[in-house]
Image: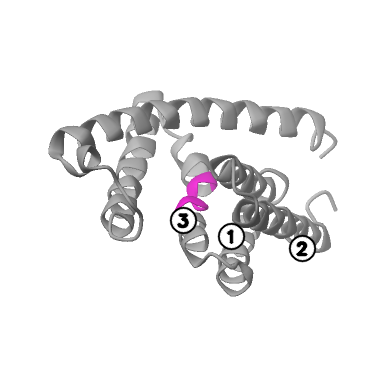
Amino acid sequence: MKNSFSRRVVLGGISTALIMLSLYGGTIIRTNKFAFMVLATFGAALPYIGGNISTGVLSYISSAILGWLILPNKLYAVVYALFGVYPLIKLKSEKFKVVFEFLLKYLWFNITLIVYYLFFKNFIYLNSFFLSTQGTIILMIVAEGLFFVYDLIFTKFIMFIQDRVFRNR
């Protein structure tokens, strides 16, 4: 009964609601859009921690579809659709040795970053420096450093949730 179907459904629903609140907050509040996206991915981790992979995948799919249907800024929904899969990538990659784990995470991150760059460079204003090869490389290095910090904070968040919220499982 510890991981019953009804518990996973409730957890997936609560997670989807938290994700949608975070995404909607990011679209209506002018500042801290990045912070709201990070909160959405933190919420996407809850069904993986408290449920199982299928609960997490269903919650991700439902929040990506709801994001596309409900959010006023569709680009924000697209960003979540690409980055919201990270909790699954993190879960799967951390089953390997540390070197391979980081290789998988950074491979996924760099592919996602390149997709973002190629897709969004035509939709948003970028300074001419960031459109140059040198600027793009600097931007990617800074982004990878930020991703390292994000992953570290995400790991601490997961450990906290496992220890404090789901410890009685």
Which is more toward the observer, 156 or 167?
A: 156
Residue 71: quarter of image: bottom right
Task: Tell me the residue that label 2 is attached to.
Answer: 9
User: Neighbour class for label 1 at 10 Å: few (<14), some, many (≥20)?
Assistant: many
Instruction: Give the crowd class for mark 2: few <14, some 14-19, many >=20 residues within 10 Å.
Output: some
Q: Is residue 160 above or below residue 77?
A: above
Left/right of residue 31 with respect to residue 108 in the rendered view: right
**Residue at position x 49%, y 46% in the image:** 86
Residue for badge 3: 79
Mark 1, secondary structure of its residue: helix
Q: Measuring 56% from the left and 65% from the top, which residue is drawn there?
A: 64
Q: Which residues are magenta?
A: 82-87
Quadrant including the C terminus: top right
For the residues marked 1 and 2, what is the alpha-carbon distance in whole angstroms?
13 Å
* N-terminal-most mark, 2 or 3: 2
Task: Measuring from the top left, give residue 55's x and y in whole percent.
Answer: 66, 59
- Where is residue 112? Give x, y as percent: 35, 49
In the rendered view, would you say 92 is above or below 64?
A: above
Of 104 and 133, the residue lying toward us: 133
Disc 2 element: helix
Q: Which residue is mark 1?
A: 60
Identify the residue at horizontal 82%, vertical 57% (top origin): 7
- As for residue 84 lying within the magenta part, the answer is yes
1, 30: nearer the viewer = 30
* Dot placed on the residue nearer the N-terminal end, 1 or 3: 1
Q: Nearer the viewer, mark 1 or mark 3?
A: 3
